[in-house]
Amino acid sequence: MDERTRRTDDDLAPALRRTADPIVKTRSRWKFRVGLGVIAILLAFAVFQTVRWVRAPSPAGGRSPQGGVQTVGAATVTLGNIRVVVNALGTVTPLATVTVQSQINGYLTQVAFTEGQMVEKGDFLAQIDQRPYEILKEQDEGQLAHDQGLLAQAQLDLKRYQTLAAQNSIARQQAEDQVFIVQQYEGSVKQDQGLVDAQALNIAYCHIVSPVAGRVGLRLVDPGNYVQATSSTGIAVITQLHPITVIFTLPEDDLPEILPQLNAGTELPVTAYDRANLRQLATGKVSAVDNQIDTTTGTVKIRAQFDNADNALFPNQFVNARLLIKTLENAVTVPTSAILRGSPGAYVYVINADDTVSVRQITTSAVDGNVTAVTSGLTAGERVVIDGTDRLRDGLKVTVAADQAAAPGGAGAGQRGQHSGGQRSPSPPPGGGQ
């Protein structure tokens, strides 16, 4: 009996499990869907709260509500001098770089300079063995003395023949031939004298002196070497440092303002700054302009000369050259930070007498440090917004936190035609700008 019952239960168990599986699967799917719905609701609520917080008006001291009074910084438009300066990358170029070479062949017996030494023109640098040339000079001097004796004898015979020819004691042809013999000996003497002078010059070449004043570089040949006039290595290189020049390039559009001043004798000052354009190295002036424009770049080379008394400029050094073309006197100046730019062009926010702001389109020219010259659109004494322009619109009422005059000058003059430091409005000014 028990055995049959147990067998019956075992037969029913698989059927009960097959019936229960769909129910379990249905409940699992329902729980999964409910979980996804809860997560979606939570995410939607979080997004809603974030948008609500962003759009909510800020309390006092934070972002101002639309239409409220805005706190801005202001500056007064003034009259001042603006320097018109162009910047260019230049290279320090010596006026003279000389490779000291031997003009004769011989052994180098002495080097009289120290590497890096400052020398003057004519200072002794090196000595080449001159004994072979002294011997050749003695030989040529001996030949010269021999030919001078022959010339003296021929000249004496000529006087005798001329006297005898006048007395009809000898044939006139003999006296005439003696004239040509004297001329031949005179030519021999002159040739011998040239050989003697050539050897004297070779002896002088053995004593090498500095052709220019400057700094001697590293020694290229050691004493004891046999140097030749055909060698391209040389003994040392001397670079002139005082004065020194900087060569830089400018666009051809700047020539109409530079050339008339140079032709009139006006000195155009040039200031050299280091590679980082932070530290001033030296001040000089334009000395020359190249005779042609580079057609590939549309630029022309300018040479500026510097005294370089403190050796601040080093040959082949890269520097930033600033050329002062002219100075705009009594120009209307405004802080560069007040100038905004949009589709209509440059504009500023002007503070009116009733503490409202209005958009004013302006025309700018040169930039000098943090100050810009304005050619039209503003007059001296007006106030412009320099801080907080991103929250303004035409006709909005403002309160001024600080008011400062726009004084020209700064760390350095900027390039002409480039207006740096100005803020950019997030949207273009209204079309009704004045």
Image: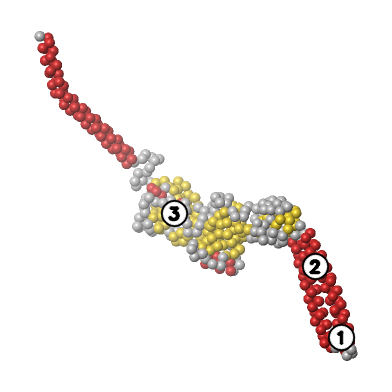
Of badges 3 and 2, the one in the foreground is 2
Question: Sequence-wise, which precedes: disc 3 or disc 2?
Answer: 2
Q: Give the Cα distance between marks 1 and 2.
A: 33 Å
Q: Secondary structure at mark 2?
A: helix
For the point 72% across and 52% down, the residue is: 223
Pointer 1 residue: 162
Label 1 close to label 2 by CB (< 8 Å) = no
Q: Residue 168 appears in which quarter of the rendering?
A: bottom right
Question: Sequence-wise, which precedes: disc 1 or disc 3?
Answer: 1
Check residue 140 in the rendering and tell me which mark sits there, or answer none: 2
The correct choice, above or below, for 422 with respect to 285 in the image is above
Label 1 close to label 3 by CB (< 8 Å) = no
Pointer 3 residue: 339
Residue 419: give x, y in percent of width and height: 47, 55
Q: Is residue 123 visible?
A: no
Q: Give the Cα distance between marks 3 and 2.
A: 86 Å
Of the pair 406 and 118, the residue shown nearer to us: 118
Q: Residue 62 appears in which quarter of the rendering?
A: top left
Check residue 109 in the rendering and tell me which mark sits there, or answer none: none
For the point 37% across and 39% down, the residue is: 59
Question: Sequence-wise, which precedes: disc 1 or disc 2?
Answer: 2
The correct choice, above or below, for 52 with respect to 118 in the image is above
Residue 422: give x, y in percent of width and height: 45, 52
For the point 89% across and 89% down, the residue is: 169
Label 3 close to label 2 by CB (< 8 Å) = no
